[in-house]
Amino acid sequence: MNIVKKYSVKTNADTIFIKVDMKNYFKIKNCPYEDFLIFVFMELSTNLVKYAGGGYLWLMEKDDKYALACFDNGKGIKDLALATTNGYTTSGNSLGLGLHQIAQNPDFDMQIYTQTKEKDSGTVVLVSQKEINEDIVFITKAYMDLEQNGDYFTKKGKNIIFGDASGHGIKAQKSANSIKNFFMDNFLSLTLVRSFLDSLDKHIKENHLRSSVLCLIEKKKNNVEVCGVGNIDMWIQDGQTYHRKTLKDGIVGEVFSNISSNKFELDKNQKLILNTDGLEPIRVKDFLDALKHNYSSLMLSLCMLHFLSSQMDDNSILIIEGV
């Protein structure tokens, strides 16, 4: 999914701006769900102001399919079943008003994850079209919410590149884009991964680009192989728990050395999660083990970015799911 709109919501004036901006956007897109999507935005943004002290809204899009995400750091929803009951309104929780109406649309799914602890409280709501069914999901959060992002992801047939160029801002983004283009122009197979990384190492140095940690992934149905260098964390789901594996061999363009390789056979709905830096490993494991596993990969990635990511770094989530 591509994040096409990001809104910060603090006041009623923000809600009004969002409504106008959404109308203009959906008019250009000729979206058949315009009225419903604007209704969702209005309900969620109003509740952010009333009950959570503000928050954020994202509009995501892929192939003319839409998803809306809402984030807050409020008190959380103590009883989700009650909060989504017809006619129920909240007085102290972060969300609730209008959730029942949103959940009734037959063309959309609504998922909610909430925490009610003193620390790390808050709620994430995802409303997405039912036709969205991806087995590979990539979501990224840029440094200090700027557009310039050193993290990158590109898919080419059964092959994927996922990585993080050093630093932040325009220079990191330039390096990330150059690496993606190099991958699209040159990469053939993981059997030639050493040759590819040697060539990429040379390309980065000759063009005075930022160095990078990265992984190359080959996905053939449910068979997944991951090769790479640098501090890319992987989390493989095993039943109700997740086990961590890490790539740590060198940095392409600076001290490139060996290549770590891992092979996985994913069962249906089993998840392999990869993340760039900005997420503390201990917190990631505790969060994943505690989270119910019936959430979609998109919802899981949004929750990880909201509850676990540092505000001072680029951080990205890549989830590959068995089908």
Image (spheres, helix red, strand yellow):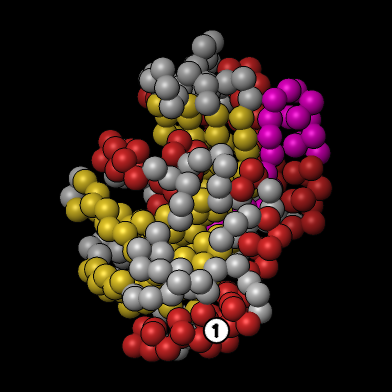
Depth order, front residue of 162/278: 278
Please identify the residue farthest to the left as the structure is shown. 239
Q: Tell me residue 230's x, y (percent).
A: 41, 64
> Magenta residues?
1-20
Residue drawn at x 29%, y 38% is 286
Within 10 Å of the Cα at label 1, are there few (<14), some (14-19), or many (20+) other Cα atoms? some
Location of residue 47 (image quadrant): top right
Location of residue 145 (image quadrant): top right
Instruction: Examine the structure image and report whether residue 111 is included in the region drawn in magenta.
Output: no
Residue drawn at x 68%, y 48% is 146
Residue 289 placement, left or right of 214 = left
Q: What is the count of numbered marks?
A: 1
The answer to whether residue 248 is above or below residue 144 is: below
Residue drawn at x 45%, y 72% is 255
The answer to whether residue 12 is above or below residue 178 is: above
Is residue 45 something one can see in this rendering? Answer: yes
Residue 267 placement, left or right of 84 = left
Location of residue 202 (image quadrant): bottom right
Residue beneath label 1, please?
202
Depth order, front residue of 173/254: 254
Please identify the residue farthest to the top as the structure is shown. 91
Quadrant where the C terminus sits is: bottom left
Residue drawn at x 42%, y 22% is 119
Instruction: Examine the structure image and report whether residue 14 is included in the region drawn in magenta.
Output: yes
The answer to whether residue 82 is above or below residue 149 is: above
Q: Tell me residue 87's x, y (percent).
A: 51, 18
Q: Tell me residue 233's x, y (percent).
A: 36, 56
Quadrant where the N terminus sits is: bottom right
Is residue 40 something one can see in this rendering? Answer: no
Give the amino acid type for the residue marked by disc 1 in the picture.
Lys
Q: Tell me residue 65's x, y (percent).
A: 59, 57
Residue 43 placement, left or right of 257 = right
